[in-house]
Structure formats: structure tokens, C-alpha cells
């Protein structure tokens, strides 16, 4: 079994790179089946969030996964290679544990990543691309994440992207009571943001979504109204605060749309937060006067607030993870020995059956049972010990000494 993690995250690549290798959940199943069927990867799962895209693979050659990732997204491997990391075996295990526990997140200790990780594994299960190795890895991963959450304060004082968005808006507008807020999308991240902004009691909240039904469901829960994405060009100018997070592969809010909105607002500022990867708002909009546009990478400074307490908890979390990594590697090493153990048992079973058949024939001819049993036990002993004895007799020097030590350990011989 050869475990590798191939990926890119917020520490190795800017959003302009990450957005080109991101996956939509609805396409992950087909992508995984393609990777494991045609590209030399036996098992695979893909974790794709705004901060990372990672392939967890059982393969002898991780370069195959990297080449597939580039090909799938119509990229040249050399263009993304400088931003990618490849983690083998123990490093891959530790990385999975740290990611699920929130230790590798932009927001140290944030809890959303665990749910995203579980969703990624669920998709891989449905796609049929998990085997013994990855099933065990993810089972242990989620158990470790739970242990870290239970036994440390890693999640204490954690400032989420949603909370950071509110803090930024307050720095620009101060009190949000008179402000009109627009959320584009209706997924989990938008729902989290809506909860934080609703608590500030803005003048109004509107949900814009591709389907009105989905947007209306969220709007009803938070006391907002819902519109279609198609209405954005005519409605954008109404809003002081725009927060967007969709799974669109192309920008939803273009530069021209923002320019027209700012003109209609008569230079009143517009605060925009793009939490999507790939981005929902064309980045050139940030260059416009009176537009304050932030991406997930721009929020990094704010989410560091309260970091001191979480860093202390992270030390305890790392201790837990290191122990659990050693436990998993021990399991993995025993799995590597399974073929040899199976072959050894098969060899012994063949010897047993052969000698048993001989004994049964002798008994059928009326031979003395005690004599037959003695011959059976003697023959089995000789044949089972023939290999080790032959190897010992034909070894010399240091090889012979090491073999003697090994045999004494195997057979628990105390001289």
C-alpha cells in the first residue's frame, strides 16, 4: 500500500492558482472514477474547499495524480507544480489528521473543515473509489479530529470567515443598522454569514440564487427576501454590502456590472466579500473607487485575532496527533506484512495436508496409530524447520550472526 497526498492550499498558492484546480462537489464522483479507472491510482478521495484542493491516493506513483489533476483542469503540469506538495505515507497521514482537526486551516481551529472533509469522503464512498487503506485512514482521521476537539481548546476564540466579514464591514460602515445586505448563493458558507450579519440587524437582507426556491428557503429562515441571479444587473446598486459564495466556475459579478452599480449609487461605497473559489466577482472590480473587495486570502489578518490561545491548544493537539500517527503507521506496516504472512500460512498448510494424507493412507492399511502419529509429527517438524535450518547452515559471518538472532526471536529461544 502506497499512500500519498497531492495538493495545493492557502499556504502554497494564491487564490488565482487555487481557483483553477478547484472541483464542484457534483462533479467529484465522475472525476474520481476517471482517476481510479484510467490513471494508475487504486484508491482516491478529493478534498476541495476555498482554501485547498487535495488528492488522497493509494498509488505507487503520485506524479500520475498530479498529471491527471492538470489534465482534468486543462492546465500544464509545469504551471501548477511549483505550488503543489506531495506527501508520502507518514507525512500524508499526519497531514490528514491536522487538516481535519483544523490545524492546517487559514483560521486555526475552525470547525467547518471537518464537515467538508466528511462530505468529500462520502462522495468518494458513493463513487466506489475507497479501499482498505483510505477507509481506514479516514476512519482514524475523524476519530482523531474528535479527540482533539474534545481534549483541547483548539476551537476556542476562533474567528470564522463569516465573523471576519462582519468585522470588516463594521470598519467601513460602523453600525450596520441602516445597511442593505446581499448574499449571492445559498450554501453552507452563505448561511453562516447570514447568521452573523442578521445579528447586526441591518436594514434588509436579500438572497440571490440561481434557483428562487433554494434562495427562498434560506430567506424564510432568516427573515430575508429572495431574488434570482438574473436580477443582479438591475438590483446590485441597491446594496451596501455584498457577500458571495457559489460553486460557479465563472464570475457571476463582472467588472461592468459593478461599474454601473457604483455609478447608480452616486459614489456611495460598496463593501464586497468574495468567499468563492473560483472567484464569483471579477478581481478587477477591486480597482474601482468606492469599491472595497476582499477575497478569502484578504481575510487572513482578521481571522488571526485570538490566535494566541489557539496556538497554545495547538501544541496539545499536535501531541495527540503524533501519537495517533504512530498508531496508524503501525497498522499500515502490519498490512504490508499480510501477503508474506498469508504465503507463509499457505506453505505450512500445504505441508500439513501432504503429511496428513500420508498418515491417513498408512492408517487405512492398518498401520499402528501410535507409529503413524510419531511419523506424522516428525515429518512435519522436519519440513517446517528445513527452510530456517538450511538458511542458517549456508550463511557465514555477520549474516549468520544476524540470522541466528532473528531465529531466536522468531522461535522465542533463550540460550
Image: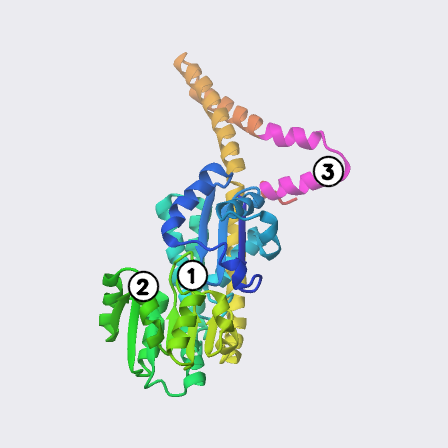
Q: Which mark is residue 399?
A: 3
Q: CA distance from mark 3 to mark 1?
A: 67 Å
Q: Is residue 147 visible?
A: no
Q: Circle 2 sits on which residue? A: 229
Residue furthest toward the bottom?
175
Residues in magenta, as a range: 385-410
Tag count in the figure?
Answer: 3
Name the secondary structure under disc 2. Answer: helix
- Which residue is farthest right? 397
Where residue 105 appears, x then y in whole percent? 49, 67
Residue count near mark 1 (Cα–Cα under 10 Å), binned few <14, some 14–19, many ≥20 = some
Residue 408 is a magenta residue? yes
- Residue furthest out toward the top: 365
Residue 119 as seen in the image, left or right of residue 50: left
Instruction: Report crowding for label 2: few under 14, some 14 to 19, many 20 or more residues within 10 A (C-alpha).
Output: some
Q: Which residue is mark 1?
A: 251
Q: Nearer the viewer, residue 250 or 128?
A: 250
Q: Is residue 197 above or below residue 117?
A: below
- Residue 48's place in the image compared with 149, above or below, is above
Q: Nearer the viewer, residue 377 or 185?
A: 185
Amino acid at each position: 500500500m502506497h499512500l500519498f497526498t497531492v495538493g495545493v492550499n492557502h499556504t502554497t498558492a494564491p487564490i488565482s492558482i487555487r481557483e483553477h484546480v478547484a472541483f464542484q462537489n457534483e462533479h467529484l464522483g465522475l472525476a474520481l472514477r476517471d482517476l481510479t479507472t484510467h490513471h494508475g491510482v487504486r484508491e482516491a478521495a478529493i478534498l476541495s474547499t476555498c482554501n485547498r484542493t487535495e488528492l488522497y491516493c493509494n498509488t505507487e506513483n503520485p506524479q500520475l495524480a498530479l498529471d491527471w489533476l492538470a489534465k482534468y483542469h486543462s492546465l500544464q503540469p509545469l504551471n501548477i507544480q511549483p505550488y503543489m506538495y506531495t506527501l508520502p505515507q507518514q507525512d500524508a497521514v499526519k497531514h490528514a489528521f491536522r487538516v481535519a482537526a483544523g490545524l492546517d486551516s487559514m483560521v486555526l481551529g475552525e470547525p467547518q473543515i471537518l464537515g467538508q472533509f466528511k462530505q468529500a469522503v462520502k462522495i468518494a464512498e458513493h463513487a466506489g473509489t475507497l479501499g482498505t487503506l483510505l477507509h481506514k485512514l479516514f476512519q482514524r482521521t475523524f476519530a482523531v479530529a474528535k479527540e482533539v476537539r474534545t481534549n483541547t481548546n483548539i476551537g476556542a476564540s476562533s474567528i470564522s470567515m463569516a465573523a471576519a466579514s462582519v468585522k470588516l464591514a463594521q470598519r467601513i460602515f460602523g453600525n450596520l443598522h441602516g445597511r442593505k445586505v446581499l448574499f449571492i448563493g445559498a450554501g453552507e458558507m452563505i448561511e453562516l454569514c447570514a447568521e452573523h450579519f442578521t445579528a447586526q440587524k441591518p436594514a434588509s437582507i436579500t438572497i440571490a440564487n440561481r434557483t428562487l426556491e433554494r434562495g427562498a428557503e434560506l430567506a424564510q429562515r432568516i427573515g430575508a427576501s429572495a431574488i434570482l441571479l438574473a436580477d443582479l444587473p438591475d438590483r446590485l446598486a441597491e446594496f451596501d454590502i455584498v457577500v458571495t459564495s457559489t460553486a460557479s466556475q465563472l464570475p457571476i459579478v463582472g467588472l461592468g456590472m459593478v461599474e454601473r452599480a457604483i455609478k447608480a449609487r452616486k459614489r456611495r461605497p460598496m463593501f464586497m466579500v468574495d468567499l468563492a473559489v473560483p472567484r464569483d466577482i471579477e478581481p478587477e472590480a477591486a480597482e474601482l473607487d468606492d469599491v472595497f473587495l476582499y477575497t478569502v486570502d484578504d481575510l487572513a489578518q482578521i481571522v488571526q485575532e485570538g490566535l494566541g490561545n489557539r496556538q497554545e491548544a495547538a501544541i496539545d493537539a499536535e501531541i495527540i496527533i503524533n501519537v495517533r500517527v504512530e498508531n496508524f503507521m503501525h497498522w499500515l506496516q502490519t498490512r504490508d506484512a499480510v501477503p508474506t504472512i498469508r504465503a507463509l500460512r499457505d506453505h505450512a498448510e500445504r505441508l500439513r495436508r501432504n503429511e496428513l494424507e500420508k498418515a491417513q493412507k498408512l492408517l487405512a492399511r492398518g498401520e499402528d496409530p501410535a507409529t503413524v502419529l510419531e511419523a506424522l509429527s516428525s515429518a512435519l517438524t522436519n519440513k517446517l524447520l528445513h527452510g530456517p535450518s538450511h538458511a542458517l547452515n549456508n550463511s557465514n559471518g555477520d549474516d549468520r550472526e544476524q540470522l541466528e538472532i532473528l531465529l531466536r526471536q522468531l522461535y522465542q529461544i533463550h540460550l
